[in-house]
Image: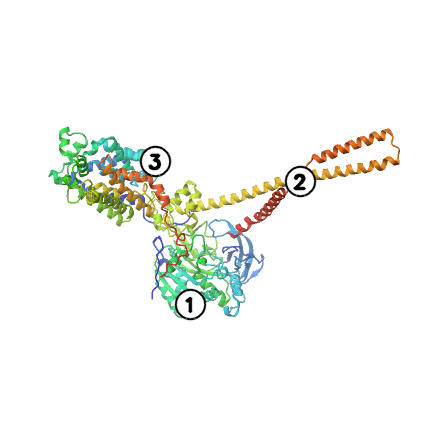
Amino acid sequence: MPAPFITGRASVTQVMGWVLIALLPGIAVYVWLFGPGILITLGMATVTALAAEAAMLKARGYPVKPFLVDLSAVVTAWLLALSLPSLAPWWLIVTGTLFAIVVAKHLYGGLGQNVFNPAMVGYAVLIVSFPVQMTQWAGPLALTGESLTLAQSAAAIFGGLPKGTLDAVTMATPLDTLRTGLLQQHTVDEVMVQPIFGQFGGTGFEWLAVAFLAGGLLMWARRIIGWQVPLAFLAGVWLTAGFLHFYDAGRFGAPWFHLFAPSVMLGAFFIATDPVSGSTTPRGRLIFGFGAGLLTIVIRTWGGFPDGVAFAILLMNVCVPLIDQYTQPPIYGATRTGKDTQK
Amino acid sequence: MSRELFTFHGGVHPPEHKSESSGRPLHPPLLPRELVIPLRQHLGNPAKPIVEVGQRVLKGQMIGEADGYISTAVHASSSGVVTAVEMRPVPHVSRLPDLCVVIETDGQDEWIERTPLDPHAMSLADLRMHVRDLGIAGLGGAVFPSAVKLDPGAHHCPVLIINGGECEPWITCDDLLMRTRADEIMDGVAIMRHLLGSLQILVGIEENKPEAIAAMQAAAARLDFAVEVVPVPTIYPGGGAKQLIYTLTGKEVPSGKLSTDIGIQVFNVGTAQALARAVRHGEPLISRLVTVTGHVLRPQNYEVLIGTPMRVLIAEAGERDGATGVVMGGPMMGVPLASADVAVVKATNCVLVRSAELFPPLPRELPCIRCTRCADACPAALQPQELFRFAKAGDFGRAQEYHLFDCIECGCCNYVCPSHIPLVDYYRYAKSEIWAREKEKRAADLARERHEFRQFRLEREKKEKAEKLAAKTQAARAQAASAQPAESPATAPSEADARKALIAAALARAQAKKAETAPRNTEHLTPEQQRTIDEIEARRAKIRELAHQPLETEEKK
């Protein structure tokens, strides 16, 4: 073996592990807002993902253990679980996770080879195929007075609740409410007086967004992610929404409201920063992040779905090779050729 | 007064492991029974052996003379008898044996007559010849013949940088040298300044060597010209020439060019000291400081005679069980050796003994996740993850487009990779493949030229044959034509004779006709034809030239 003979302590497991740790604040707030049902969702997605990962590794002739412990499947599972509505039925979770791991990850060549973010592929498949189930969000604590118990959540997830009961506990999300209101020719101000809208985002949802933001900052502080993608993503959302809001405040939601939707924070810090399917150059990351943020607002405003983060990121995933090719940074001695920068 | 420093891109902070060896004093030279001195210890042409088996040589006697401009001499490190001039294993990454002079030492360590030189009393060209004949080569690792670098001929280098960075973990020989022989280093710097006409002299030393910095600053203060000793941040590879240049001046060496192109020449501190010994004492480069460290009982710096087997040093430093290999150099860029039986050469700054505890085997390689930690760590500001992708896919053209050849193989990318991919191996592989392909292409071009020339030659020979034949028949016809009228009046033509003459004339006609239709000679060529032939001749000359080239370039490597 030639040099170097030493290596640093970084490992894929460590990188993925930090992503999971950074998700914990968000999960905690989620539990507080919507009850412990999310833990069932997370657990089920994790088990499904690991089983699918192991089966695919075996089928592809790879050693199972070193790849299972890299935790990348768990990250995919958690990101998908956190994107799903809090009362998503069990088969929805399993289907989405299977699609993410089997198709989006392994059929593209496994770890490091997937063109698209697996969790977002899983999400996109579900929202296109099962739009109704994908709206089964429980009302947040602040509106319902008490969050669902573990047993209630389990009943909802496994289909043990009578039909009427489920309808009683679910509620439209803030983004859904805004969208529906605007479609009914109400102005933004008219819609925004509803109780689902909170201080700067959606009631309850805004704190989930803050928790994801905190986790994201932790990852940045630990140098697990760079600042370019999240900042550009948030800027893309804020500037696009701000521009539209400034143009016609009656028809377009406020930029802060758009920014503090949990999906934006989750997308900006945890999903768009996926190194495998994202851009690799510093300038490319700015373009990638900004593009995803801009598309998020475009899809939210004019698209067929209430939220656009998943599609925005998938669309930008397609652009990565092009972005990377045209944003190669200058190498040592290439562009700054012999330039005397001495003062 | 503090100099503005520039921060180069990337770099890593591996554990330093300097204290193991830096605490102990310098170990005096050991005199092994046998010295194995390779004739190729520097870049450029290997030295030509000038001693014979059985000949007694003295310490410092030249045993190999410089061969050409980019070459330098090799000397006996101690007195003794030459027992062989043969191929021996040498410490080289290729692990191929090379021509060595083997000397059985006689224990007397008897010097040749040494003549100190006065650099100011001789021409600069003469001084450089002496430097070459005293075997001075860069001791920082590249071992480039110093005489060449001290020739400002083509490029005037107003800035002289002395490299005391020593950024590789474990190695402390330059540190010790600066701490103990700062004045001699500065003396060497003065000679360099004299040869190069330097206007500004900077010494870069990493901050983790405060004693060396203090010693060098004190020595600089005693000089009658200005030398600025600058502490630079401790970061690997801050001691790399290009990185040190940037840190100290903010200038980048243009891709594919040399530092002299931007007016900067860089020497290692050890080279400066060796130069001073050579000029002031007439001592050729026959010893150097070597850090013997890693998995040994007493890690220490040694003054080592060139040609001393590494095993002798390891034994003296205290061999331990569990050694898993020997590396020449540091853990980031060192050369793994097949065995410790090879000799210390001018390029040997460290003998690092590996063990499983100090250098555990690297974890299993996982796929690249494009996290770009390698790009963040790359001091050449490359995109190692892309280079890896191209190298692995065999897309060497793209790898070159992405500046593969600007990679300095420092190993930073390897070091930070969370997937533990041996990235540098992939780059070395891609580089060697590209070299091999270029060689192949050159060979193919050569073969094509040869084939084309052969075709031309065959054609020409055919033409020449036809031409000869035509000339012959023409001559025969002329003879026949002149013979007939001369004959007829002299003798009465009989019927038989007339018949014979008729047949002969018919034959001649037929032959003449044949000659007319046959290809004509090369005398009356159209300009086009002439041009073609000229072109072919030119190509032929080029072939001859090319046929000699590969040999020369190979020797240079």
Give the SS element for disc 3.
Answer: loop
Residue B261 % position (x, y): 45, 57
Q: What residue do we see at 43% from left, 41% from top? A: B395
Dot placed on the residue nearer the N-terminal end, 1 or 2: 1
Between residues A299 and B133, which one lies in front from this camera angle? A299
Q: Nearer the viewer, mark 1 or mark 3?
A: 3
Residue to which mark 3 is pinned? A108
| Spatial separation of the CA atoms under disc 1 and disc 3 | 64 Å
Residue to which mark 1 is pinned? B183
Q: What residue do we see at 52% from left, 59% from top? A: B72
- The numbered mark 3 sits on a residue in which chain? A
Residue B540 % position (x, y): 60, 45
Judge whether A309 appears above or below B291 on screen: above
| Spatial separation of the CA atoms under disc 1 and disc 2 | 74 Å
Which amino acid is tagged 3?
Tyr
Crowding near the residue tagged with mark 1, few <14, some 14–19, many ≥20 C-alpha atoms within 10 Å: many
Query: Which residue sits furthest front?
Result: A247
